[in-house]
Image: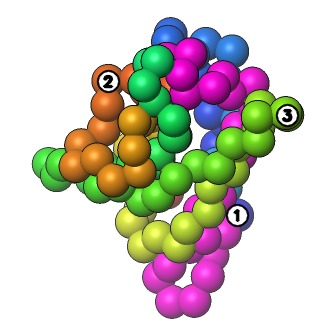
Amino acid sequence: MLRVALVGTPEADAVIGKLELEKAEGESALMTIWVRELPAPQALDEEAAHYLVWMSLPDEAPRRLGELHRDPKTREGRFAAPIEEKDFVIEITAEIDTAPETPSRHVVIRRRIHY
């Protein structure tokens, strides 16, 4: 298992978390992200209502993986998805809806992962 620390961007500098990759069947891995001290999306953009997780591969546009679910009481968020990629950048962004074509400029976490 690979564990990587996550820290917030200057726009959300109190955010901390971790990303874990656990080997699954074949070449795939289960990627799980936990974050704490995650402000409401509206704190970054008054119209935002969701946090989305994006993956970027070298020389490719970011791909939306799904929504990071945030508990408003604890200010914690969690996301899990199977992946096969070994070298990528992960981003978590505040978004107005759950199906934008590209990430917003409101990035709370950005981290390159290589394993």
Task: Check if residue 30 falls in the magenta segment.
Answer: yes
Q: Tell me which amino acid carries mark 1.
A: Met
Q: Earlier in the sequence, mark 3 or mark 2?
A: 3
Q: Nearer the viewer, residue 94 or 34?
A: 94
| Identity of the residue drawn at 70% across and 64% down | 1
Which disc number belongs to residue 74?
Answer: 3
Which disc number belongs to residue 1?
Answer: 1
Residue 111 visible in this rendered orientation of the protein: no
* Residue 31 drawn above or below residue 11: below
Q: Nearer the viewer, residue 99 or 82?
A: 99
SS of the residue at dot 2?
loop
Residue 101 in the image, given as x and y percentages of width and height = 22, 49
Name, please, the residue furthest toward the right: 74
Q: Tell me which amino acid carries mark 2.
A: Arg
* Residue 79 drawn above or below residue 83: above
Inter-mark Cα distance, 3 to 2:
25 Å
Please give the range of residues in magenta: 21-44
Inter-mark Cα distance, 3 to 1:
27 Å
**Residue beneath label 2, please?**
105
Q: Earlier in the sequence, mark 3 or mark 1?
A: 1
SS of the residue at dot 1?
loop
Residue 27 visible in this rendered orientation of the protein: yes
| Identity of the residue drawn at 63% across and 26% down | 40
Asked whether disc 1 touches disc 2, contact meaning CB atoms under 8 Å apart, the reply is no
Label 2 environment density (alpha carbons within 10 Å; few <14, some 14–19, many ≥20): few
